[in-house]
Amino acid sequence: MKLLRLANTVNSTSAPYNQFSLGLKKTIDQTFCSLFQHDIPIDKDIKGFHGDGSILRMLRIIKKLISQNNYDVVHIHSGLTGIIFMIAAFPFKLRLFNKVVFTLHNSWNVLKLRNQILNFFVMLTSKKICTCGISSRESLPGFITFFVGKKTEAIVNGFDHDRIDRVQNNKLDACHFEKSAKVKIVCVGALNKTKNQITLLKALKESNIEGEVIFLGDGVNKETLIDYSKNISNSISIIFKGRVSRDLAIEHMLEADVSVSLSNGEGLPIAVLESMYAGCFTILSSIPPHKEISPPAQRNLFVNTSDNSEIINSLNHIKDNIKQIRSGRIESKEYSITYFSVNNMLRGYKRVYSSI
């Protein structure tokens, strides 16, 4: 099977590359083409092409690829690259539309209006549409479901547990958290309004928890969050490390006691699944994608992000039960691997590929 994969970027957090391409590299002949230059090296078993952010350059690359190769499947991971592909295929390669799989990697309400419009047009012309989970599929508005519902299927996201095992086995003795920290909390995600880190900082300001919080990620809210954190008690150390490699993020999860995501919207968050496998207790906002993961009750607390007291109470629960939390890491690990292994996800996609 020959597959052309189209996405915006290839970086340390790129699901199309890290979960899909690497997971299938031994079984499918893959070509990965991204709109922007790759931020990380492409595996030798995957043919990689990239643009420089220019739509015209991406268009030329795709036209050349589809003229020189007979692809069995074209897997599109963003509305923008899907539109570029549609233009590239017109008018001589229209038959390729019957080989297109489109994956919606987020909940519909989280997308910007521009991306909603682009996605909708790509979904209309795709042979098969996959959402990253049941909650993602259910987030589709009724009028979109009317047009594309019959060819839409939910395939729940999976995470690469082998990678986490490898990182754990190779991890050096150096620690990312202070060894003396009474509670170690990690937050992974872009620093923006949707990911909602400010709500955690507001709760920390009013709590009396002692420990260390590390934020991994970058974004438009970075300076605002850093400024706010300076007014929080010195009993809790707050560090912003910016964007780091996936392996380094996993190292932090392996050390942390708790992983916190108070996001207002998600697809099906890989970082939460990875942190569970790494053994973290979780504090999660009560949104459908988090509910879909539904960690074991003894290893998770759901909170209403509009109620600051709920978040403060969850932090106090961590403080008061830290010994039990640290001793129960295996429960999170076993649950995540049972229900969210990347192998389960890839089996679903192989079936979809074969069907077209």
Image (spheres, rainbow, N blue to C red):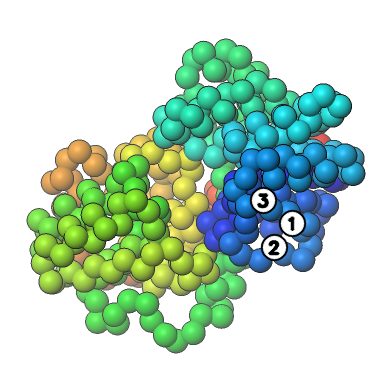
Q: Disc 1 and disc 2: Cα gap in Å?
A: 6 Å
How far is disc 2 from disc 3 in space, using C-alphas?
A: 14 Å
Q: In the rendered structure, which amino acid carries the disc numbered 3? A: Gly
- Crowding at dot 2, Cα within 10 Å, few <14 / some 14-19 / many 20+, comes out as some
Q: Position of residue 315 (x, y in %)?
A: 20, 57
Number of dots carrying numbers: 3
Structural crowding at the residue carrying mark 3, measured as other residues with C-alpha within 10 Å and reported as few (<14), some (14–19) or many (≥20): many
- The residue beneath circle 1 is 48
Q: Which residue is mark 2?
A: 42
Snapshot quadrant of residue 103: top right
Q: Residue at x 60, y 36 (%)?
A: 80
Per the image, label 2 sits on a secondary structure element best described as loop
Image quadrant where one finds the N terminus:
top right
Query: Label 3: which residue?
Result: 51
Cα separation between marks 1 and 3: 11 Å
**Residue at 34% from the left image edge and 51% from the top image edge:** 220
User: Mark 1 or 3, which is nearer the eye?
Assistant: 3
Residue 121, compared with residue 263, is above or below; it is above
- Give whichever of 140, 218 is nearer the camera: 218
